[in-house]
């Protein structure tokens, strides 16, 4: 008898619990709020990624029925966390990821296709630069969208060019001519720091002017060699700049960050860098005199020489499970429409993130003169971006060999032929 009473009591408790849960679910449903878990690669998005954070805040203000739950972690921890979550099939709804890992998740069938979003928003499809979409397509499936554009090139101190009576170059021949003038006057032409081997962005774009993207697929397939005459010619140009004194005397022991300071202190005419340094340069004593350049064209180059570098940064991905939740899917596609639309693009621009679409943006030139010049270069008529950074379309070991080869010539430790062979040997090892 006592046992029966206990069982009945338990059943009543369970029933009350379930009713309570049911009531809570009904309240949430009646509330009509859809929550999106969005995992990002910085611990404090508000401070570390203000453009992204402000965009998300504005979207939520305009869409009170959608809540974005930002999950921020330092990049290394974030990537590790995403990989662990993928193993238990518990990915966040939307998340940032490194390109190579993103491709692996797509191959594993863990991502929602975004073709519906692209095809359903032809205005955004037409506005996005082609490489922003093509980079994250596999077998016709759009599996990712760029988080932001990555813009790299050469910043230059116009005041130094004016001081020594030379024009900002356009061709390689003009670059060698100004290098001779700066060398005679104790000015470094291009600030570089070999201790951070990855800091060769503008030089990678120069490699694209020697037919890199026409050759790389065949090279990786073993049908051609990286050690070819066109690439040797490319390294020969770097070697000639070295001999002319274009680089710092202490380039082999200097870091990238020291190279930045050298430029900001007026000791170098140019800096190989990218959009991330715009704000720092604008706030420096030389800020109002600095411009942005895509680097020289080459007479012996291969193919189009008017090559810029506005490439997609690491992608935003959506978990495949989102496709099974119509409300969540609709909310995320609405977020993307805002993110890549004119309003989102303007919010990015106001925080000095260049547009990845052809949408016109308003920039306060008096407050941000260098950012305005950088955006003007992006929109320069007749110039076309390389599909991606050359180092981002090869395995990490080969990318490291490419960095080594470029700095090896800059430091004088490799001849042009040896530099090309270093990368060719690494490709052979990888294959």
Image (cartoon, rainbow, N blue to C red):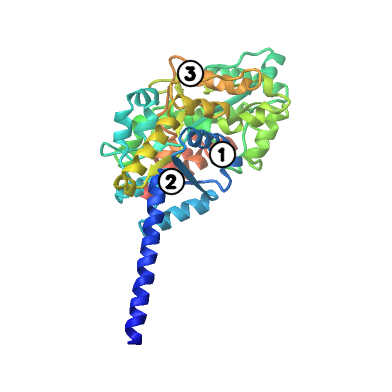
Q: Which residue is mark 3?
A: 360
Q: Which residue is mark 2?
A: 35
Where, quadrant-wise, is the N terminus in this rendering? Answer: bottom left
Left or right of 414, for residue 384? left
Mark 3 and mark 2: Cα distance apart in space: 32 Å
Q: Nearer the viewer, mark 2 or mark 1?
A: 2
Q: Residues within 10 Å of mark 3 (few under 14, many from 20)?
A: few
Nearest to the observer: residue 137 or residue 239: 137
Of residues 65 and 286, the one drawn nearer to the viewer in this rendering: 65
Rendered image quadrant of residue 142? top left
Above or below, comparing residue 105 to residue 160 in the picture: below
At mark 3, the secondary structure is loop
Q: Residue at x 66, y 31 (%)?
A: 280
| Labels 3 and 2 touching (C-beta < 8 A) | no
In the rendered structure, which disc, 3 or 2, sits on the residue that comes first in sequence?
2
x and y, in percent, of residue 74 in the image: 55, 50
Residue 226 in view, yes or no: no
Measured in 3D between alpha carbons, the distance from the residue under mark 2 to the one under mark 1, in whole angstroms, is 21 Å
At 40% from the left and 25% from the top, the residue drawn is: 129
As measured in the structure, the alpha-carbon distance from the residue carrying label 3 to the one carrying label 1 is 22 Å
- Which residue is label 1 attached to? 49
Question: Which residue occupies 43% across, 46% down?
Answer: 35
Q: Position of residue 325 (x, y in %)?
A: 32, 46
> Is residue 233 something one can see in this rendering?
yes
């Amino acid at each position: 008898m006592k046992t029966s009473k206990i069982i009945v009591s338990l059943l009543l408790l369970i029933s009350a619990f379930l009713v309570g849960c049911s009531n809570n679910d009904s309240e949430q449903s009646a509330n009509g709020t859809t929550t999106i878990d969005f995992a990002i690669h910085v611990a404090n998005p508000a401070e570390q990624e203000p453009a992204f954070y402000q965009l998300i805040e504005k979207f939520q203000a305009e869409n009170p029925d959608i809540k974005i739950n930002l999950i921020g972690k330092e990049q290394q921890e974030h990537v590790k966390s995403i990989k662990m979550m993928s193993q238990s099939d518990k990915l966040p709804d939307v998340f940032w990821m490194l390109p190579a890992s993103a491709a692996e998740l797509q191959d594993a069938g863990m991502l929602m296709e975004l073709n519906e979003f692209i095809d359903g928003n032809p205005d955004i499809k037409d506005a996005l630069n082609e490489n922003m979409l093509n980079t994250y397509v596999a077998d016709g499936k759009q599996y990712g969208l760029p988080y932001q554009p990555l813009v790299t090139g050469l910043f230059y101190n116009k005041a130094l060019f004016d001081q020594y009576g030379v024009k900002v170059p356009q061709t390689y021949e003009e670059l060698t001519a100004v290098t001779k003038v700066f060398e005679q006057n104790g000015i470094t032409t291009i600030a570089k720091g070999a201790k951070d081997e990855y800091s060769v962005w503008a030089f990678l774009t120069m490699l694209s002017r020697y037919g890199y993207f026409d050759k790389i697929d065949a090279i990786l397939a073993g049908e051609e060699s990286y050690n070819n005459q066109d690439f040797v010619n490319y390294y020969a140009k770097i070697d000639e700049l070295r001999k002319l004194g274009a680089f710092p005397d202490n380039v082999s022991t200097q870091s990238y960050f020291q190279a930045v300071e050298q430029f900001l202190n007026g000791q170098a005419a140019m800096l190989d860098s990218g959009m991330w340094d715009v704000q720092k340069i604008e706030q420096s004593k030389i800020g109002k005199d600095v411009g942005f350049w895509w680097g020289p064209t080459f007479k012996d180059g291969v193919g189009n020489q008017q090559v810029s570098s506005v490439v997609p940064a690491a992608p935003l991905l959506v978990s495949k499970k989102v496709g099974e939740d119509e409300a969540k899917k609709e909310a995320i596609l609405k977020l993307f429409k805002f993110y890549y639309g004119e309003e989102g693009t303007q919010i990015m621009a106001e925080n000095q993130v260049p547009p990845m679409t052809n949408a016109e943006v308003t920039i306060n030139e008096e407050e941000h003169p260098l950012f305005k010049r950088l955006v003007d270069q992006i929109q320069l008529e007749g110039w076309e971006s390389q599909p991606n950074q050359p180092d981002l379309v090869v395995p990490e070991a080969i990318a490291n060999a490419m960095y080594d080869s470029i700095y090896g010539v800059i430091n004088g430790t490799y001849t042009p032929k040896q530099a090309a062979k270093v990368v060719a040997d690494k490709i052979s090892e990888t294959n």
